[in-house]
Image (cartoon, rainbow, N blue to C red):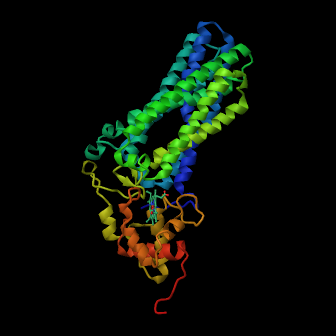
Amino acid sequence: MYPFWEVPFFTSGIVIALIATFHILPCHLATGAFWFSVYVERKAVRQNRPELKEFVQKFTLLILVFCFVIGSLTGVGIWYSATVASPRAISGLIHNYVWGWATEWVFFIIEIATIYVYYYTLGRIDDKSHLKIGWIYAWAAWISMVIITGILAFMLSSGKWIETGGFFDGFFNATYWPQLFTRTALMFAIAGVYAVTVASRMSDEKARHEVVRTASVWGIAGLAGTAVFMAWYLYKLPEPAKELSLGGGLPYLGHMLTAAGVLMGVIFLYFLVVGLIRPQFANVVTGLAAMLILFAAIGAGEGFREGVRRPWIINQYMYGHQVVGPDLPAKGIKSEVAKFQEEGLLKNLYFIPDEWRTITKETAVKAGRILALHQCGNCHSFEQDGKIRPLPPLLAGMEPESPDDLAGFLDSLGDYPYMPPFTGDDQDKQAVGAYLFYRVLGNPMIDEGE
Ligand code: HEC
């Protein structure tokens, strides 16, 4: 086990989620935008309307700056935060999908190179060649999505990979196509919001209203597609994930889905009212407001997607606390649950002071804290007023009367559909029980014999 990255009050998952939500706006914009941009440019060329090119130029500049600065920074941010939050899970993914990522990055490089060429050659080379560059960008960007979605979907539904260990068995899994279609539709909706905002700054009024309207139609079509494909996605969720989310196992997942739906409904109204009926209302302020709503909707939607994976971080392979669940003979991977329960988890933690390895009354709470962080800290905060499933109120709800009660509770952890089993031996359980009872719940330490 690697050292644990503790993020007080919020847990490391929230850090990844925040960065990821900031990433999704620019990256879906980057994939969706050029289909619209090239469409407008083609119209400008075919109908000989140079005033439309003003939009293409402004829109491309926005994408260049927004996507390739914020998008790139947050993309790297996801790698950094996910690597320190769940190093073993990232390692597991890389061992399976390094060539997937390598392929994706080839398309990234094409994307980055072509957007610069596209922007700086606008109006300087012949129209036909310029349009071709736009098409290369649009396809390269979308293909990068085609690839990354396979790896994302693999984490929720690992498919036949469990038996075969095959790259494509995991890649083209049950939720792959619905997720790819959902993201593809969503990218047009996101591009629509940005396009409306950029178009509202065009100087020619007739052209302005026309582009705002067209962008809104694209946005509405994108939202409608998102709704349809999302329903398909929900239908394709693995049974346990359906139980947790739609069956009410974890009510907050249902709430997140509702929130995403309602917020998307608001964006729909925005396209309808500001975009189609009253294009003169389209401006930077309403555009920014729409982006904020979009941001919240995406946060809720992605939170749902991440949440339904419980108790796994990689479905049927690695638990949320980064312990390998079952044997995977096809990959030569052995389950660690029995191993850690036999040997003890403490023995398998390498980055702790040696004196904590023998549990005494003094060291129990210290070793217990490290063990508890590893076993619970990915999903729970430990502070009374923690923001993510704080343990103190949850544990107090069980009304434990001694550390032993809590140690006993740990045995039943795997019976919850959303929690992995506790993977440690009796000594580990005692230590965690002591830490939770005395430190997390704040019970006074009483000397034995008194
Ligand atoms: C993979 C994530 C995950 C891990 C790891 C995990 N939990 Fe949980 N736990 C949850 C979720 C999800 C809930 C549901 C409560 C909620 O979301 O409000 C929960 C609920 C609980 C509850 C309330 C039980 C109830 O009645 O619903 C307790 C107590 C608890 N966890 C303790 C622990 C302890 C102690 C550990 C570590 C030994 C741990 N959990 C590890 C995800 C996890």
Q: Is residue 23 left or right of residue 228?
A: right
* Residue 106 picture location, percent across and down: 46, 32
Question: Which of the two residues, 73 or 285, is positioned nearer the viewer here?
Answer: 285
* Residue 32 picture location, percent across and down: 54, 27
Residue at 30 percent across and 43 percent down: it is: 161
* Residue 261 picture location, percent across and down: 53, 38
Is residue 61 positioned above or below 360 on the image?
above
Is residue 326 positioned above or below 79 on the image?
below
Residue at 64 percent across and 6 percent down: it is: 48
Is residue 248 positioned above or below 429 on the image?
above
Is residue 116 positioned above or below 378 on the image?
above
State which quadrant residue 36 falls in. top right
- Quarter of the rendered image showing ligand 1: bottom left
State which quadrant residue 200 falls in. top right
Visible residue check, residue 144: no
Visible residue check, residue 165: yes
Q: Is residue 166 left or right of residue 178?
A: left
Residue at 55 percent across and 15 percent down: it is: 131
* Residue 282 picture location, percent across and down: 70, 26
Question: Which of the two residues, 141 or 394, is positioned nearer the viewer here?
Answer: 394
Question: Which of the two residues, 179 or 112, is positioned nearer the viewer here?
Answer: 179
